[in-house]
Amino acid sequence: MVSDVVWAASAVQTDEPRLLRLQLPAQDLASALEAFSRATGMAVLVDRELTLGRRSIGVHGRYSAQQALSLLLTGSGLMARYARSDAFTLQEPQVSRLVANQGLTPRSAARVNRSYAMALQQAVESSLCRSPLTRPGSFRALVQVWINRNGLIEYSRLVSSTGDAQRDEALVRSLATTRVDRPAPSSLRSPFTLLLTPGPTGKPMECTVREGAQGA
């Protein structure tokens, strides 16, 4: 039986979320959670095996405890489930088992899926183009994203590194701000897999629409 890891500290309850100044470096997830618990006073109960091989991204600045936790978990493939306001556990996102589109022919469904894939591609490109570090065209990466009903990328997982730890962190931060401007068709289900590939010149793209990110 796998033992659980528990970190706990007393937390002060307030009506308004208290902003904390945090300096948590990117590190293995188990160590990050321990540091987060000490810094915020939140208690976390997590199966040790769930954190193996997973990393956090850095959290630097002023955040509420919940904002900081959401950021810390970005790219880990895990989500927080709160037992109360000052205690949480972690779990893998639940993947909805969606049925095929009703009333659509296979050709029509494929057209809808391609249209959504293009919308997702453009949304990701738009987010990545905000920083020279993440501008597509000069690196390769494979990522998986979970998109909620509002079109926001709620969780992401970096399947293969870009080869640069700083870029990896910037990449998952950018994905966390991405919103797709249309709902996903019911014939598709999360996670969506995105392949970011270098261009023929190996230089960052000019950030024009429909270049850089491939696949959904």
Image: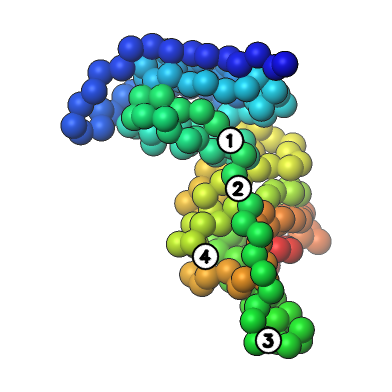
- Residue with the mark numbered 1: 91
Q: Which mark, residue 180?
A: 4
Q: How many angstroms separate mark 3 from mark 1 (CA)?
A: 35 Å
Query: Of the residues under marks 4 and 1, which one precedes in the sequence?
Result: 1
For badge 4, the amino acid type reads Val
Query: Of the residues under marks 3 and 1, which one precedes in the sequence?
Result: 1
Q: Nearer the viewer, mark 4 or mark 2?
A: 2
Location of residue 113 with respect to 193 vertically, above or below: below
Q: Give the image quarter of residue 199.
A: bottom right
Who's the residue at 45% across and 62% down the image? 150
Q: Is residue 48 left or right of residue 181?
A: right
Q: Nearer the viewer, mark 4 or mark 1?
A: 1
- Residue with the mark numbered 3: 104
Q: How many angstroms separate mark 2 from mark 3 (CA)?
A: 26 Å
Which one is in front, 27 or 10? 10
Does dot 3 land on a helix, a strand or a loop? loop
Who's the residue at 69% across and 35% down the image? 164
Query: Of the residues under marks 4 and 3, which one precedes in the sequence?
Result: 3
Location of residue 92 with respect to 46 vertically, above or below: below
- Mark 4 surroundings within 10 Å by alpha-carbon count, few (fewer than 14), some (14 through 19), many (20 or more): many
- Residue with the mark numbered 2: 94
